[in-house]
Image (cartoon, rainbow, N blue to C red):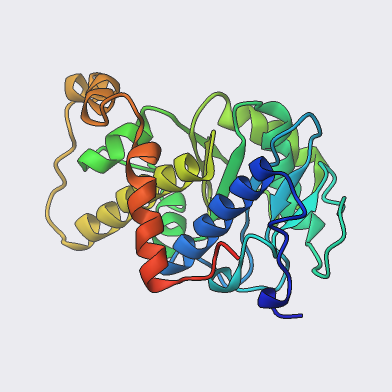
């Protein structure tokens, strides 16, 4: 069934529909920015309401094909809780379910296997303070050692421990993860995470001695970010413009 054959707008609550539209937009933007890894990563978002239900991509659908209606509603075990013609990959929700369970504030969890992110995750020193983009990431960053494809339930406590209260998690030899109160927040956090990794890889490739940013400047970055975003947060500030870009370049996500 093609994604255009299904439209749930008038069969779900307005709050759920808004969550669906924003999550579908995050998937489309991930493809637009070139961070998708075919169909092998996920972005999940909690459905508003008392139930612990979540939205995730239909397994096998490319990120630039995903629509608000094609997203699948599941429980914390990755099982479908509403009718959908699409399958899900329960194993792919393993990382996400761990984070959603441990962090009530992590209403959206985004995980990528971007080339730059994986490259930096394989470096012993991890992310370096080489750019303005990296400073906000470094202020809220954890690391999780690679344990193979994330299929084992017993990895969850270690993953939760390594994320802690941070916004960013570097999965060693694997990729990047961000959390946010909204798909906008998680996506924009991933933008800065990925940009930091890309800058680092390119700076290292230049062959010159690297110039790290001094610790006193790093210590004051959180206050500067709040000032620069006028207290609204980067996600709220940037998201409307990103949706306009999608409307021009990848329309149909809100179907």
The answer to which of 124 and 233 lies nearer the viewer is 233
From this viewpoint, is residue 245 visible?
Answer: yes
Q: Quadrant of the C terminus?
A: bottom right
Residue visible at 40% across and 52% down? 120
Q: Nearer the viewer, residue 249 or 165?
A: 249
Estimate the x, y position of residue 50 in percent, counting from the top left.
Answer: 79, 29
Q: Residue furthest bottom?
A: 1
Tell me residue 86's x, y (percent). 80, 69
Q: Is residue 107 above or below residue 84?
A: above
Residue 33 showing in the rendered view = no
Towards the viewer: 18 or 58: 18
Image position of 119 (left or right of 172): left
- Relative vertical location of residue 34 with respect to residue 214 in this rendering, above or below: below
Instruction: Please give the name of the residue rendered at 79% of the width and 62% of the height, measured from the top-left corner.
Output: 88
Classify residue 251 as left or right of residue 220.
right
Point 78% across, 61% down: residue: 89
Image coords of residue 112 (percent x, y) = 53, 56
Left or right: residue 27 versus residue 133 is right
Residue appearing at x 41%, y 42% in the figure: 189
Vertical position of residue 50 compared to residue 209: above or below:
above
Locate residue 10, reporting x and y percent.
72, 55
Total marks shown come to 0
The quadrant in which the N terminus is found is bottom right
């Amino acid at each position: 069934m093609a994604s255009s054959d299904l439209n749930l707008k008038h069969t779900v609550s307005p709050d759920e529909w808004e969550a669906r539209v924003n999550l579908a937009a995050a998937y489309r933007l991930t493809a637009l920015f070139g961070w998708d890894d075919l169909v092998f990563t996920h972005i999940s978002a909690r459905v508003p309401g008392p139930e612990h239900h979540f939205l995730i991509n239909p397994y096998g659908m490319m990120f630039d094909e995903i629509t608000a209606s094609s997203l699948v509603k599941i429980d914390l075990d990755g099982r479908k809780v509403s009718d959908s013609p699409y399958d899900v990959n329960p194993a792919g929700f393993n990382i996400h379910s761990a984070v959603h369970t441990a962090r009530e504030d992590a209403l959206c969890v985004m995980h990528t296997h971007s080339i730059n992110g994986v490259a930096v995750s394989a470096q012993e020193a991890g992310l370096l303070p080489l750019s303005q983009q990296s400073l906000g990431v470094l202020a809220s960053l954890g690391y999780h050692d690679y344990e193979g494809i994330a299929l084992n339930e017993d990895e969850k406590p270690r993953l939760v421990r390594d994320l802690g209260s941070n916004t960013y998690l570097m999965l060693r030899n694997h990729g990047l993860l961000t959390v946010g109160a909204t798909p906008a927040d998680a996506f924009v956090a991933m933008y800065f995470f990925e940009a930091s990794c890309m800058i680092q890889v390119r700076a290292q490739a230049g062959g010159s001695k690297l110039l790290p940013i001094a610790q006193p400047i790093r210590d004051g970055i959180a206050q500067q970010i709040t000032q620069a975003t006028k207290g609204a947060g980067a996600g709220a500030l940037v998201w409307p413009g990103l949706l306009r870009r999608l409307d021009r370049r990848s329309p149909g996500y809100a179907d």
